[in-house]
Image (cartoon, rainbow, N blue to C red):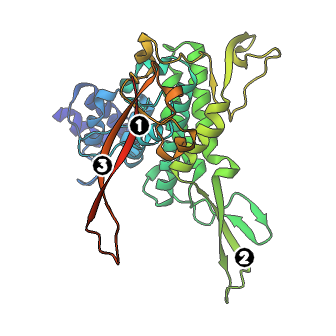
C-alpha cells in the first residue's frame, strides 16, 4: 500500500483520478480505507467515508462515481429513500408515497425506495400500476432535490451558469439557468437511476418499463403546469427595462399529487413487441401505439391485494386498518373508504372521550363527553 501511495506522485492527473476510483471501489466492496496523497479533500468533506456507509446498498458504478466526485449530490439523492440512522427523519419518498396512497388498499406501508440494487423489494419486479407509481415518484423527488441543490450551488457537478440563457423569451427577457437547474437535474437523475436498469440481468420488458416510468417522473416535474415562471426586473428606477426569468419547480407534495392524480389513475397497459431494430413497448389496444413519454405504463394487472401472496406485491394485511364509511370524509381523514379498502368487511367501535366545553370569556372549566365512532377493517 505504501508503494502504491508513493507511486501516485509520479502519475498523471488522469491516472490519479482513475486510481481514486479504483480505491473507492475497493473501499465499498471490501471495506478498505484509502486516501490519495494529492488533491486530498478537506476533513469536513470525505467521500470515502460517505460511500463506505452505503456499501450494503450495492451502488452501481455511476452511483459510485457521483459518490466520489460529487458526494454532496449523492447524499442528497440518497436521502430521498435511505434512512441511515434511527434518528434521521423519514425519507421523503416514504412520506409522500404513504400520504398519497393512504386511501388505497395498497397503501405503501413498508415500501422502500428502489434507489439502489441492495434495496430492491420483490414488488419492484411486478410491473403493476403501483410499481409504476413508486418509480415515477422516486425519479421526480430525486429530480427536485438535485434541481434545488444546483440552485444553491451545493453540488460541484452542476455549477451555476451565471449570465447564460436558454434563449431570449422576447426582446427584454432571458432565461437564467442558475435557478432550479432542470437541465442538470435531468441529466444527474437519469444517470443515477436509469443506469441501474440497463443491466442485462433484467429482462427487456422490465428494463424498458422501469426506465419509461423513471422518465415519466422527471417529465412530471418539468410539465408546464408544475413549474412557475418568476422574473426579476432590471432598471434604474424599477422601470423593468429588462427581465431575467427563471423556472421554479413546485414542491414535492404538489408533484406527488400530480403523479397520483394525473398519471397513476391513467396508466396504460403495454406489451413488449419485437421489432427489426429491437424490442419496444406498445399499448395493449386494438390498434397498438407507442405509449407517451409522459404516461405511466404497466404490464401486469394489479391483484386485489387480499390474496395470500399480496406481500410479494408490497401490500400488508389490511386487517386492523382504520377506515371511514362516508365518502365525504374520504379526503379529509385520508383513511380510505371501508367498502373499498377492507377485504373482509369492517367493524364499528364506539368509545367515549372527554373534551373541554361551555367556555365563557375564555374560561374553560367544564368537561363534557361525546361518543366517537371509528371503523376498522376485519
Q: Are marks 1 and 2 in contact (CB under 8 Å)?
A: no
Q: Earlier in the sequence, mark 3 or mark 1?
A: 1
Q: Dot 1 corresponds to which residue? A: 65
Residue 208 in picture, x, y percent from top left: 61, 21
Where is mark 2, residue-wise?
242
Most foreground residue, 111 or 40: 111
Q: SS of the residue at dot 3?
A: strand
Marks 3 and 1 in Cβ contact (< 8 Å): no
What is the crowding at mark 1: few (fewer than 14 residues within 10 Å), some, or many (at least 20)? some
Q: Which x, y percent locates residue 259? A: 59, 39
Query: Quarter holding the C terminus?
Result: top left
Does 66 appear above or below 242? above
Estimate the x, y position of residue 287 in percent, counting from the top left.
83, 16
Image point (41%, 28%), residue name:
60
Tag 3 residue: 353
Distance between the alpha carbons at the discs numbered 3 and 1: 57 Å
Q: Residue at x 47, y 22 (%)?
A: 124
Q: Is residue 296 toward the left or the right of residue 99 in the image? A: right
Q: CA distance from mark 3 to mark 2?
A: 62 Å
User: Quarter holding the N terminus?
Assistant: top left
Q: Is residue 233 above or below residue 264?
A: below
Q: Nearer the viewer, mark 1 or mark 2?
A: 2
Q: Earlier in the sequence, mark 1 or mark 2?
A: 1
Amino acid at each position: 500500500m505504501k508503494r502504491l501511495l508513493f507511486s501516485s506522485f509520479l502519475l498523471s492527473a488522469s491516472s490519479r483520478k482513475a486510481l481514486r476510483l479504483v480505491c473507492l471501489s475497493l473501499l465499498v466492496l471490501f471495506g478498505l480505507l484509502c486516501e490519495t496523497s494529492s488533491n486530498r479533500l478537506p476533513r469536513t468533506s470525505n467521500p470515502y467515508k460517505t460511500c463506505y456507509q452505503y456499501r450494503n446498498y450495492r451502488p452501481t458504478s455511476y452511483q459510485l462515481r457521483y459518490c466520489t466526485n460529487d458526494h454532496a449530490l449523492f447524499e442528497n439523492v440518497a436521502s430521498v429513500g435511505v434512512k441511515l440512522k434511527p434518528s434521521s427523519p423519514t425519507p421523503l419518498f416514504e412520506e409522500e408515497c404513504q400520504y398519497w396512497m393512504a386511501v388505497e388498499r395498497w397503501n405503501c406501508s413498508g415500501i422502500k425506495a428502489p434507489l439502489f440494487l441492495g434495496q430492491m423489494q420483490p414488488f419492484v419486479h411486478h410491473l403493476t400500476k403501483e410499481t409504476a407509481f413508486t418509480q415515477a415518484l422516486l425519479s421526480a423527488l430525486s429530480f427536485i432535490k438535485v434541481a434545488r441543490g444546483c440552485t444553491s450551488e451545493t453540488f460541484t457537478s452542476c455549477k451555476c451558469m451565471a449570465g447564460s440563457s436558454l434563449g431570449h423569451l422576447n426582446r427584454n427577457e432571458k432565461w437564467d439557468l442558475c435557478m432550479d437547474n432542470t437541465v442538470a437535474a435531468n441529466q444527474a437523475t437519469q444517470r443515477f437511476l436509469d443506469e441501474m436498469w440497463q443491466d442485462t440481468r433484467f429482462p427487456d420488458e422490465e428494463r424498458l418499463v422501469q426506465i419509461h416510468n423513471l422518465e415519466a417522473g422527471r417529465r412530471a416535474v418539468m410539465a408546464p403546469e408544475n413549474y412557475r415562471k418568476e422574473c426579476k426586473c432590471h432598471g434604474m428606477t424599477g422601470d423593468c427595462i429588462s427581465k431575467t426569468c427563471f423556472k421554479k419547480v413546485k414542491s414535492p407534495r404538489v408533484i406527488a399529487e400530480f403523479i397520483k392524480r394525473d398519471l397513476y389513475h391513467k396508466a396504460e397497459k403495454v406489451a413488449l413487441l419485437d421489432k427489426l431494430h429491437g424490442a419496444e413497448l406498445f399499448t395493449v389496444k386494438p390498434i397498438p401505439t407507442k405509449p407517451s413519454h409522459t404516461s405511466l405504463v404497466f404490464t401486469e394487472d394489479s391483484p386485489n391485494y387480499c390474496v395470500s401472496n399480496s406481500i410479494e406485491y408490497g401490500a400488508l394485511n389490511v386487517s386492523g386498518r382504520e377506515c371511514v364509511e362516508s365518502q365525504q370524509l374520504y379526503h379529509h381523514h385520508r383513511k380510505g373508504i371501508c367498502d373499498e379498502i377492507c377485504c373482509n368487511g369492517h367493524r364499528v367501535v364506539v368509545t367515549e372521550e372527554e373534551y373541554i366545553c361551555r367556555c365563557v370569556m375564555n374560561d374553560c372549566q367544564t368537561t363534557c363527553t361525546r361518543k366517537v365512532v371509528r371503523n376498522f377493517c376485519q
